[in-house]
Structures are given as C-alpha cells and as structure tokens.
Image (cartoon, rainbow, N blue to C red):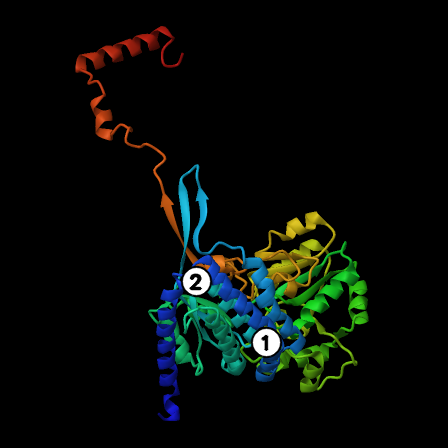
Amino acid sequence: MSLEDRDLISVQEARNLARKAKAAQVILAEFNEKQIDVILRAMVKSGAENAVRLAEMAVSDTGFGKVKDKTFKNEFASTVLYDYIKDMKTVGIIREDTEKKLIEIAEPMGVLMGIIPSTNPTSTIIFKSIIALKARNGIVFSPHPSALNCSMEAARLMHEAAVSAGAPEGIICCMSKPSMEGTDALMHAPEIALIIATGGSAMVKSSYSSGKPALGVGPGNVPAYIERTADIEKAVRNIIASKTFDNGTICASEQSVIAEACNKDKIIAEFKKQGAYFMSPEETAIVAKALFTSSLAMNAQLMGRSPQEIARKTGITIPEGTTVLIGEQKGVGKEYPLSYEKLTTVLAFYAVNDWKEACDLCIKLLNNGGIGHSISIHTEDREMVLKFATKPVFRILVNSPSSQGGVGASTALAPSFTLGSGTWGGSSTSDNVTPMHLINIKRIAYGIKDVTQAQPANEVKKSVVPVTNDQVASIVTEVLRRIEKSGGLNG
C-alpha cells in the first residue's frame, strides 16, 4: 500500500483488534474471582517493576513531565490501585438481601475502548487495563500518536503479564497505527461495548457522539482559594507540590490561585519564599501568548514543561530554582488567557475582597472550561468548606494538593486516572472511575408482596349499589330542609 493508504491500514487494524479482543473476552467472562485476582497481581507486578522504564519512555516520546513523577503515577496505577480494588466484588453474586429476597450478579460489559492522552500515557494504560480485567472485560487502546511507543510498550507489558497468569491471548490490544479514521472505526466497531475516553475535549465529545455508551472526562481548570483562616505556608506548599508534580499534566492540577485582600501580601511573599516567580505584566503577556494558539488551544510545545524551559522558549529571564510561574489576571475569558486550563507550570493569580467575591470568581473560572471537575480550598473554617460545597463541581479538595487529591493519592477518593465531571461537565459520571463502573448488574427478584388479592376495578364497580330517581329526589329534599332549618344558604 502507498503512504496515502495509512488511514485504511489503521481502520483495518482497529477492526482486527476489536474482533481479537472480543474472542478473548468471551473466554475471560467465564473466569472466577480467584482466576481474575491471579491475573491482576501479575499485571500489578509488571507495572511496578517497569514503572521507571515506562516513565523514561513517556518523557522521551512526548517531552512532557518528569521521570520521577511519571514513575510514581505508574506505581500508583498498579500497586495503590490494586490495594483499593482487590476486595471489590465484580464476579458472580456481589450483593444479596435475604429479607427483600433480592440477588445482584455482576456481568462484564464486553470489550472496552480506551482513548489514551499524551500527558499521562503509560499510567493511564496500566490503570485502564487493570480495572478492565478486574471486571472481566477486554480492552483495545487508541493511543495519542505522540505517545505511541510508550503506549504500545505499556499495553504489551500488561498483556504479557495477564496472559502469563492465564488470561486469553488478545485480551489487551493497542493500535500501532493510530489515526483519526482508525480511532473512529474502533469507536463504531460492533465489538466495542463502552468507550473510556481520557484526553482533549474534542475526543471526549466524539466518544459521546459515537452512539456507544461512554465514560468521558473533561478539562479541570481548577481554582485554588486560599481563605483568610488558611495556614498560608502549608497552602502554598501544597499548591506548588501539585502544580510541579509531573509539570502540571494532571487535569486536577490547580490553574488559578485566589487570595483575599487581607492575606494577599502574605501569600505572595510565601510563594516567592518557596521559589515561585511573579511575572511582570509584560512577561505575563509574552508567556500567555506563547502558551495558547489563536483558538485558545494549548501549545503542545509548552505543555508539561518546567518554568526554565518555558522561560527559554519565551525569552523571559527568571531566577535560578524557580518552581512555578505566576501571572496576575484581572478577569476571566479570552482577554485573560491565563484564566484557561494550563497543563504546565504556570498559574494565574487573582485578588478578591472577601469569600463572596472568591465564590463568584471560582464559578466564572469553572465556567471557563472546568465545570463539574474540581475546586481546591485552603481553610480552617468548616462552614466555609460547606459554602464552597455548593459550587458546580464534584470534587471539593480541602487542604490538599489538588493533583494528588483529585486522583486519590492524598485523599480518600478512589484511586483513578479517569475523573468524571458529571452532567455539568458533559460526562456520564461524576465519580472517580473504578471497576464498578465497568460491570453490568443482573438482578434476581423474588415475589414478596401478594398482589393477587387486590380487588379488580370491575369488581369495585359491581359493589356500588344503584340509586333510583325517587331516592335521589328524597335525598335532595332532605338536604334542602336542613339548609332552611339552619338559616338558609347565608346562615
């Protein structure tokens, strides 16, 4: 075939992989809980043992993030995830109510399609592979072209580990020739039961418009509000730890910092103390222009980059050891580009008069590309937390790094790299996705109420005693007599 036929090759590969995975999944569906657990432990072991190498490949392929942090994510997606899901009931009877005589049985969905982002490729593949097989599903991955090599290697390792532990050949597949046409063909393949989409808004929307059930996650654009009662040193430390984690590539990372007038100076001083560089208005404009295209899509050349690399590419000068770049903004929208999601080491900074203004600003920022996802608040006031719980998001992260908190590393949320933003954000779930989102539940329901003794409607009609005209006239006469005796209608 000629180079012009690459799209046809991609489409054919997608169809072949979907069929292969379906044949394998039919076999896996018959596995018991013990067999599945043996497979998962082999996959977890492989993910942990290869965490560093996969992280190095991901950074080499994409240029995004840090090897150390991607290593952590690979380990998190294997060992931490397994510890959380190992006791989940996803095979056979998962619940039984003896009093109500109701039995619930888990059934696999079938073959899943996993759309993989360039920002977190290997950890997302490890994560989705494990939760898919925990629920006895097969999975076929459509990787981002810029992360192809590391994605294919992560999928290969997961597949080999699963097969070595007894899983059928072909249960985990990855496209080697990804294209828009191939991805579309995979979405529409009859063997695909559900799409798990992690990536850009366009890809997520495409998943939902495919006609297949989908679990898609939208952008974050997380505001971080440092309220007047907050421990400022700790709050700043958490924000920097989150924003520098893998150079800000997690969608739950903070995008804007909101300070109150009463603590603004202390917050700025603490950020500077911890290595943040507050850009001048001129520098902010230069960096903002470089970060985004004319359509306000983020420039991939600056995504997941260190402050030093951003400074080099934009020509600004920053102090040695700078941790994050911060640019003050006076509003939200196209005229203020830093008010959008920035998956890199750049933060917007806002100052407000009080918590009410902070509330209003948070809503504006969320409506600017993060509705439904997450919000971060640093405070010692529980009532303030409850006030912010009314905001249009499904994760309110309190006194925690937002990146690590959102995925469940520093909070009690489910460990996950697929964070739903609910119907507000165009997602079918507001949860951190787990294997429980990847099963169908069959119910056996015994009759517990005797409805056969209820009197039929026609029997009710038969029991009504007919009234003659003379009886009606007599009743009317008696009613009129009583009215007259009581003083008439006005009495």
In the depicted view, which residue is nearer to us: 335 or 174? 174
Q: Which residue is mark 2?
A: 136
Q: Which part of the image, by quadrant, shows the C terminus?
A: top left
Q: Which residue is mark 1?
A: 50
Locate residue 187, reporting x and y percent: 39, 71
Say which quarter of the image contains residue 25.
bottom left
Q: How many marks?
A: 2
User: Of the residues shown, which amino acid type is indicated by label 1?
Assistant: Asn
Looking at the image, can residue 426 be seen?
no
Q: Is residue 1 above or below residue 54?
A: below
Say which quarter of the image contains residue 432.
bottom right
Looking at the image, can residue 207 be seen?
yes
Q: Is 216 left or right of 334, judged from the image as shown?
A: left
Locate residue 364, reporting x and y percent: 60, 62
The residue under the point 46% across, 56% down is 90
- N-terminal-most mark, 2 or 1: 1
The residue under the point 69% across, 65% down is 257
State if disc 1 and disc 2 touch (CB < 8 Å): no
User: Of the residues shown, which amino acid type is indicated by label 2?
Assistant: Arg
Secondary structure, mark 2, is loop
In the depicted view, which residue is nearer to us: 313 or 85? 85
